Amino acid sequence: MKIAIAGTGYVGLVTGVVLAHLGHEIICMDIDADKIEKLKKGICPIFEPGLPELMAENASRLTFTTDYSAAYSDADAIFIAVGTPEKMDGSANLSYVFAVAGQIAESAKRDCIVVVKSTVPIGTNDKVEQYIKKHLKHDVNIEVVSNPEFLSQGTAVRDMLHGSRIVVGAESEEARKAMAEIYKGMNQPIVFTNRRSAEMIKYASNDFLALKISFINEIANLCEVLGADVEDVARGMGMDPRIGDKFLKAGIGYGGSCFPKDTKALHWLGNYHDHELKTIKAAIEVNENQKLRLIKKARKYYDTFEGLAIAVLGLTFKPGTDDLREAPSLTIVPILLDDGAIVKAYDPCGMERFKQKVNGSIMYCGTPEEALKDADICFILTEWPQITSLKPEVFLSMKRPIILDGRNCYKLEDMEGHDLVYESIGRRV
Ligand code: UGA
């Protein structure tokens, strides 16, 4: 099939490349000319393991353009995979989605389906369809289909190729058939439902995962007070298949471009319809506080951070990505700097972006060892393998080896017997 993809962010590009891999002819469209130039040269503009290789393998079925009319006029399906960032009030900004809808209405010259991959509030697909139909320039049939994505950054290619399900919200048999045709060759169950339910599946899934994380983080904080070990607690809980063992890793809170935004957007939507989602509200609040957890721990050792050299290991919101959006580092480092600390930061991928976002006394270090040398305290914010593989002796080069580990990177027994202070989340000090 001939498929156009609007947006070459990590969702759009991964979708395009994987659909090319399935044998479809793909044209990716983006308004960012630099990005498109890179893509035309075969350069992958985002950090996503496995994507450059798959892109190269399927290059003959992939084209890239900034010309929306060339992309949309002749497609069997047009995927919308543009961002839906958070607005000031927590609701989702749909202006990019509707901008694409307008371009489709202007350019589509044959019947096609418009597949919304972007995460959009419940009811948006209906509005997008109405909008396109109202503004159509040519006499064609268009149907909008909701097809939310469940990719995680860092494992996006694997997630799409081997996901747990494909969700399709469609209102007609023809649209369902077209979607089945698009995903033919994928060994995944397809959940067919209506558009609104598909939109809700996406929000409810992300918000439930966020809820699970906030829940285990609260339990972890109580474990510390009561002398229990959250890792054992999570293991014991997770063996019950009704609970499941995933997303029960305690830490300093969830970040990224999805959970923070999607919890706020669904909470906003609930309030808008006079149905406050109290569990989601709690998950958001717990997460905000959890980001400050290591700062609170550090205050036990120092009243002020003024003049201290603080090693910060890990800046990205999780390993395997250079993305900093809503990363705990963006909350924690400015607090340290504001208090007069000198931050010695290390991250294998996120330092360039961090430089653009945060100003102040930050020394960027090429290795964890360099960051730790002579530091007065160390904060661990992301569980990169380069950090989890550090041996306890490495920390002994610090002026005062106090390690506050926000991601439970090391076994407690491995950290014992060395002349260092090691505190993590939900485990004995
Ligand atoms: C998330 C979802 O996992 C995907 O299914 C979804 O498609 C995606 O959002 C999206 O809506 O686009 P992502 O944000 O890439 O994916 O990252 P996750 O791996 O889910 O991690 C999110 C945050 O939760 C990270 O900060 C991570 O450190 C934290 N986390 C995750 C925990 O603190 N504990 C856990 O047990 C798991």
Image: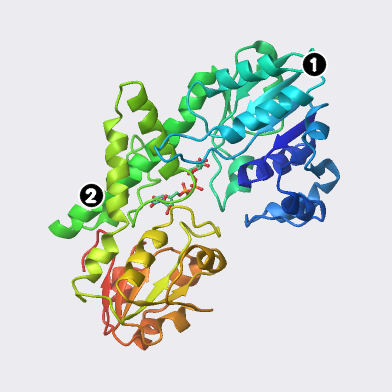
Residue 76 is at least partly visible in this image: no
Q: Nearer the viewer, residue 137 or 374?
A: 137
> What amino acid type should be assigned to the residue bearing mark 2?
Ile
Query: Percent x, y for residue 352?
Result: 56, 67
Q: Mark 2 points at which residue?
A: 219
Give left or right: position of 152 versus 342: right
Q: Does the residue labelled 2 lie within 8 Å of ligand 1?
A: no
Can I make out residue 423 in this image? yes
Q: Residue furthest left?
A: 226
* Three-letter code for the amino acid on which mark 1 is drawn: His
Q: Which of these two is toward me, 405 or 238?
A: 405
Cβ at disc 1 under 8 Å from ligand 1: no
Mark earlier in primary sequence (2, 1): 1
Q: Relative to residue 232, is residue 134 depicted above or below? A: above
Q: Distance between the residues labelled 2 and 1?
A: 58 Å
Give the colouring mode of the picture.
rainbow
Q: How crowded is mark 1: few (under 14 residues within 10 Å), some or many (20 or more)?
A: some
Q: Is residue 43 left or right of residue 345?
A: right
Q: Mark 1 points at which residue?
A: 138
**Number of marks:** 2
Asked which secondary structure carries label 1, the reply is: loop
Q: Which part of the image, by quadrant, shows the N terminus?
A: top right
x and y percentages locating residue 68 in the rendered image: 77, 35
Q: Dot 2: within a 10 Å radius of its alpha carbon, few (fewer than 14), some, or many (20 or more) residues?
A: some
Q: Residue at x 55, y 63 (%)?
A: 353
Q: Quadrant location of residue 179? A: top right
Res. 417 image quadrant: bottom left
Q: In this view, does 4 lie to the left or right of 327?
A: right
